[in-house]
Amino acid sequence: MVKLRLKRCGRKQRAVYRILAIDVRYRREGRDLSKVGFYDPITNQTFLNLSAILDFLKKGAQPTRTAHDISKKAGIFTE
């Protein structure tokens, strides 16, 4: 099963997160299938590759709660 989830990057006290499509059997910092965006909580910047995210969702990928909330703010989900 594939999930859309966050991977922590950056340095101490300055976290930046990549949004990845990753197999659930891999750990958080493990090998990803595709990078579909990033999120910087300090500056509140978000970049999402909408076509890649929608493609993974059509194939059955499930977003985590945080990835869902970030995508919802970008307008992917209408709930």
Image: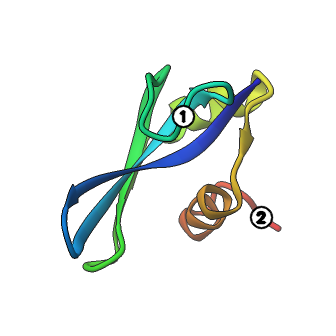
Relative to 47, 59 lies left or right: right
User: Which residue is painted at 65% across and 27% down in the image?
Assistant: 56
Relative to 72, 43 lies left or right: left
Between disc 1 and disc 2, the foreground one is 1
Relative to 5, 11 lies left or right: left
Place of residue 10 in the rendered image (x, y in percent of width and height, measured from the top left): 20, 57
Residue nearest the observer in this picture, 41 or 77: 41
Q: Quadrant of residue 42?
A: bottom left
User: Which residue is painted at 50% across and 20% down in the image?
Assistant: 33
Q: In which quarter of the image is residue 55?
A: top right
* Disc ID at residue 27: 1
- Secondary structure, mark 1, is loop
- Secondary structure, mark 2, is loop
Q: Do the residues labelled 1 and 2 touch (CB within 8 Å)?
A: no
- Most distant residue in the left direction: 11
Label 2 packing within 10 angstroms: few (<14), some (14-19), many (20+):
few
User: Which residue is painted at 67% across and 58% down in the image?
Assistant: 68
Residue nearest the observer in this picture, 38 or 11: 11
User: Which residue is painted at 62% across and 63% down in the image?
Assistant: 66
Give the residue type at disc 2: Thr
Q: Is residue 60 above or below residue 47?
A: above
Q: Quadrant of the N terminus?
A: top right
Q: In which quarter of the image is the C terminus?
A: bottom right
Q: Which badge, 1 or 2, is on the more N-terminal residue?
A: 1
Label 1 packing within 10 angstroms: few (<14), some (14-19), many (20+):
few
Place of residue 31 in the rendered image (x, y in percent of width and height, measured from the top left): 44, 22
Q: In which quarter of the image is residue 2?
A: top right
In the picture of the structure, the residue carrying the numbered disc 2 is 78
Give the residue type at disc 1: Arg
